[in-house]
Image (spheres, rainbow, N blue to C red):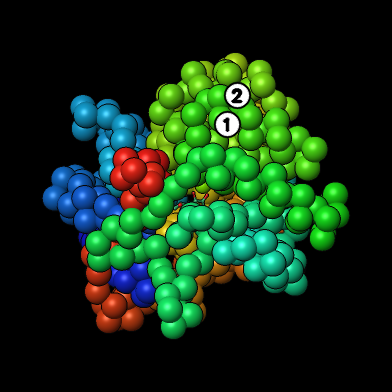
Amino acid sequence: MKIVDAKVVVTSPGRNFVTLKLTTDEGLTGLGDATLNGRELAVVSYLADHVVPLLIGLDPHRVEDTWQSLYRGAYWRRGPVTMAAIAAVDVALWDIKAKAAGLPLYQLLGGASRERVGTYGHAGGRDIPELLDSVRARLAEGYPAVRVQSGIPGLKAVYGVVDTDDTGAPVLHQQARPLVEDWDTAAYLRHVPAVFEAVRAEFGAELPLLHDVHHRLTPIQAARLGKDLEPYRPFWLEDCTPAENQEALRLVRRSTTTPLAVGEVFNTVYDYQALITEQLIDYVRSAVTHFGGVTPLRKLFDFAAQYQIRSAIHGPEDISPVGMAAAVHLDLAVHNFGIQEYSGHTPLTEAVFRHAYTFTDGHLHPGETPGIGVELDEELAAAHPYEAAYLPVNRLHDGTVHDW
Ligand code: CS2
Ligand code: MG
């Protein structure tokens, strides 16, 4: 069998997605997600201009060799654009291989290690009462765990809280120009423990509560927050400090027993190396789409398993249903599964990407369809062309740019 066609499909059914579609001479097709939120067209060019020409004529069954050729053959390694492009090829090849075998992908990854995949959902509120309503809504949807994000008194707009404009309409965090949000670390550090106090008082001690700091603290501030939240037993504190400085986690780790999750911005195992071998974290967060695909992410999970670190694949709306499907197959198969982030997608997105995975009572299952179980409606995709969109930028009150 050989690849005879490769196309990059850009569509925006409410937000931008980049998808690679491969077709073989036997008529099998494979899909891969290459979406890099806010920098999509860079990956489109990497794929269309530099990778697609190399794929034509290749044997799609040579998944590992193709991955190694794209990673080492580029000479310039790592980084979100390169690894998102390689990820799309990798997942599309796994899709084809599993279809050729007549099996759902998870069966090629060792088969099921569990019956279903536990998830967490997002709860957010501009103030605590609104957050409590949002937690209630996620619980009603069956989520077994909830991430809590709250507005901060004195701040205009904060990550993870659906802002509304004067008419009450939600303000999407993807804008044609970066939305400028404001930030005040001291106000944040004062407020988060009160948020956990209120959620625990309302929903009790058992509900797994997660919180995403979104890269905004210094190491000592992250240590402070980890300690302040210990009485509330968080399931994890995510991205407590900018992950480029991995040394920072040594200080945080020796200061608190609050579990730590890191890695959605990481794209190779080298980003994690010290964090795993020194057991500085408890969950690895990379998504199939941003880590180079199923091939390297499975290897990362096996490496992490030696240190009793578990998977927690990144799964917001900007991971397409193609990327989500690949994640759920991995989630079902790996032994050291931790939890899967799942925000779901809009009905229009689900119409463009018809998927076999199901979400029932807060749990996902990849389904039994051969391959990754996603079909792309190219006609509907074409009806929703790319729209320039940027992630917000965060500034302190004196105007200094801060991590978003
Ligand atoms: C967040 C993401 O889900 C999360 O943990 O960190 O929603 C992140 O903000 C987006 O993926 C950025 O595109
Ligand atoms: Mg995050």
**Image location of residue 332, percent across then percent down:** 65, 50
| Mark positioned earlier in the residue sequence (1 or 2) | 1
Residue at (50% x, 34% y) in the render? 217
Q: Of helix, strand and loop, which one carries label 1?
A: helix
Q: With 93 as the anchor, is 294 left or right in this view?
A: right
27 shown above or below 235? below
User: Viewed as shown, does residue 104 lie left or right of 398?
Assistant: right
How packed mark 2 is, by other alpha carbons closer than 10 Å (few <14, some 14-19, many 20 or more), is: many
User: Tag 2: residue type?
Assistant: Val
Q: Which mark is residue 27?
A: none
Amino acid type of disc 1? Ala
On the question of residue 301 being in view, the answer is no
Q: Can you give x and y, in whole percent of width and height, for residue 17 in the image?
A: 34, 63
Question: How much space separates mark 1 and mark 2, taking CA atoms?
Answer: 6 Å
Q: Quadrant of residue 265?
A: top left
Residue located beneath label 2 in the image: 252
> Where does residue 127 sit, x and y in percent of width and height?
62, 63
Q: Which residue is mark 1?
A: 222
Q: Secondary structure at mark 2?
A: helix
Nearest to the observer: residue 292 or residue 113: 292
Q: Residue at x 33, y 60 (%)?
A: 179
